[in-house]
């Protein structure tokens, strides 16, 4: 074997080794970025769902006064109705599902507003409210980006 042939083999070995290293780095980076993106998406969905559940829970307890919290309907589906009186006028806050979103709408009692006017709280596939007992409400919620969730809220004051 001559010297030129040995240098060619050495150069090919180094180039091949470099290419294997480069391909490994690119594939590991791509895999890591994909895993990271999946984790971020799941964490974002969970954060959004948990924050919204906390909002619903606190909304009920904020209005936990004798007889002001009830289950009703709005926009053709289940709704949590929270009544309050301001200057001898009754107002209602509705928490309901409309077009894939849990919404909140504050309006005068008996006034019919377009359900699209409500403020978006959470993207959902389904939202159902059940009055389990006089003081216990069950919320069955399927958030858009996470698994089914059930939230129980106990109302402390009762009629």
Image (cartoon, grey):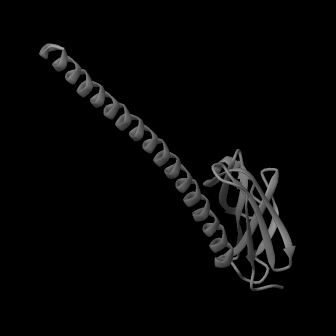
Left/right of residue 140 with respect to residue 11 in the rendered view: right
Q: So how many labels did they put on this image?
A: 0
Name the spot of residue 34 as percent of width and height, x first: 48, 42
Residue 31 in picture, x, y percent from top left: 46, 40
In the image, farthest residue toward the left: 3
Does residue 4 sit above or below 11 in this rendering?
above
Residue at the outermost front position: 1
Could you tell me which quadrant the C terminus lies in? bottom right
Q: Nearer the viewer, residue 16 or 131?
A: 16
Q: Position of residue 28 (x, y in %)?
A: 41, 40
- Side of 65 relative to 37 (left or right): right
Q: Residue at x 46, y 48 (%)?
A: 36
In this view, which residue lies farthest toward the right? 133
Q: Using the rendered view, name the quadrant where residue 54 is placed.
A: bottom right
Is residue 121 found left or right of 134 in the rendered image? left
Instruction: Name the residue at 84% across, 66% down.
Output: 130
Q: Residue at horizontal 64%, vertical 71%?
A: 59
Nearest the viewer among 104 and 34 is 34
Query: Where does the N terminus fall, quadrant-wise?
Result: top left
Task: Name the residue located 66 percent from the left edge and 55 percent from the top edge.
Answer: 103
Which image quadrant is residue 45 in? bottom right
Task: Give the answer, above or below, for where 101 lies relative to 83.
Answer: above
Q: Is residue 38 above or below residue 155?
A: above
Classify 153 as above or below 23. Answer: below
């Amino acid at each position: 074997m001559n010297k030129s042939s040995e240098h060619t083999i050495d150069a090919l070995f180094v180039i091949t080794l470099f290419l294997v290293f480069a391909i490994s780095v690119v594939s590991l980076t791509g895999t890591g970025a994909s895993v990271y993106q999946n984790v971020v998406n799941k964490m974002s969905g969970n954060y959004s769902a948990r924050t919204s559940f906390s909002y619903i829970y606190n909304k009920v307890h904020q209005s936990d006064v004798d007889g002001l919290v009830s289950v009703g309907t709005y926009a053709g589906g289940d709704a949590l109705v929270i009544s309050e009186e301001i200057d001898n006028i009754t107002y209602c806050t509705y928490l309901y599902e409309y077009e894939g979103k849990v919404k909140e709408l504050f309006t005068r009692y008996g006034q019919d507003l377009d359900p699209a006017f409500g403020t978006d709280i959470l993207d959902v596939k389904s939202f159902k409210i059940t009055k389990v007992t006089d003081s216990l409400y069950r919320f069955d919620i399927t958030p858009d980006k996470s698994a089914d969730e059930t939230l129980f809220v106990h109302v402390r004051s009762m009629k």
